[in-house]
Image: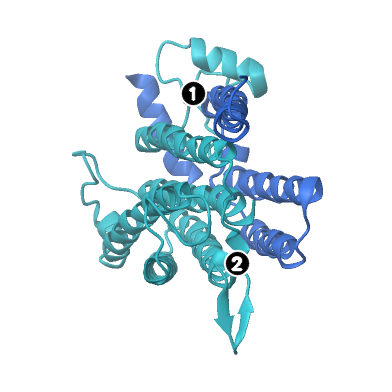
Amino acid sequence: MSEPKIDGFELKPGFKGMASDTASDQTMFKGVHWGKAMMWIFLLSDTFVFSCFLISYMKGRGSTPVEWPNPSEVFALEAFGVPVPLLLIALMTFVLITSSGTMAIAVKYGYEKNRKMCGWLLLATALGGLTFVGMQAYEWSKLIHEGVRPWENPFGAAQFGSFFFMITGFHGFHVSIGVIFLFIYTYKVFAGHYEKGKKGWFTKLKGDYVEIEILGLYWHFVDLVWVFIFAFFYLW
Amino acid sequence: MENTNNIEKTDKKEEASTHKIGIYLWIWTLLFVLSFFSYMVDWYQFQGMLRWSLILFFMFLKAGLIMAFFMHLFWERYALVNVLLWPMTAIACFIFLMAAEFQYTLFSRLFYFVVGGGA
């Protein structure tokens, strides 16, 4: 988003620019809002947390001699009397991608100071996230009814349950937090906080539509993690 | 101080010029199509190397599109992009270490619990 121009400063592009940005005696990330840099660093640490979960899942699944439950059967759903493999998971994926798209466009309208469009798209994103959490709650209760527990399950290797609940639970927790913040920011945008110059989060500085981009980073990250969970947990 | 003030000033000017909506719609469509394809991998029950390579291919493509365009990394300066992407090599190393580890654990379990040890 940033093509920063600083008076009396020549910002070189590419790796030369990286070297001079890193070596400069003030901000390293030129033209990047501090909140955005902080969000990126948080997301980087979150990446490590999710990676540890997925790697432990790989280790657990790879080291058991007992057969792993077949995800396309475990997560199948009956539609019109026919079991469709991974139906619910596919729907969840599409819902999350839809909300990611509305978020991206909300960020764009935010920067254009189009308050109404930004607000409506944020609301759509929040509702998409809420739908996702609802579907996940349905998925969990269905599996719990079928007897899946963190320590045992009727389908195969006992480790399946603990990895399933841990990984999808932690992701669902992220989605839930995101939904809460999406509703808060929908309110802030519709109430015109950025036009009035109300102060932002954790700061006495005036809020700005860059906050929508920061929220967007978090939301896209949640979608990004789901891409990996979908591939490794449900498809593999 | 003077320079940071300038950054804030230029930031405000930048807000007027955003990306065209078309690029977001394109990426959005692509993500739908790629998700559909990765679902088809399961639908047609591809197995073995074909399945795994297709899953990984679609996964990395989707992740790359989200990071590059939705998260704007494509337009960020290299200082930020490199700070974010190089740590991923540590994760790759960890994956290789644990892959070696699970193979050894599986071998030990089969050797001692199923075969009954060397005796």
Under tag 2, what secondary structure? Answer: helix
Q: Is residue A67 left or right of residue B15?
A: right
Q: Which mark is drawn over residue A73?
A: 2
Q: Residue at x 42, y 42 (%)?
A: B12
Which residue occupies the foreground of this view, B80 or B22? B80
The tint of chain B in the picture is blue
| Residue A65 sits above or below residue A187 on the image | above
Q: Residue at x 38, y 56 (%)?
A: A172
First-in-chain label (2 vs 1) = 1
Is residue B16 at least partly visible in the picture? no
Under tag 1, what secondary structure? Answer: loop
Residue type highlighted by circle 1: Asp
Residue type highlighted by circle 2: Glu
| Residue A101 sits above or below residue B58 on the image | below
The tint of chain A in the picture is cyan
Residue B97 in the image: x percent, y percent? 58, 22
Pointer 2 chain? A
Pointer 1 chain? A
Q: Residues within 10 Å of mark 1 (few under 14, many from 20)?
A: few
User: Marks 2 and 1: CB-CB under 8 Å?
Assistant: no
Distance from Cα at disc 2 to Cα at disc 1: 61 Å
Q: Which mark is drawn over residue A7?
A: 1
Q: Residue at x 57, y 30 (%)?
A: B102
Q: Which mark is drawn over residue A110?
A: none
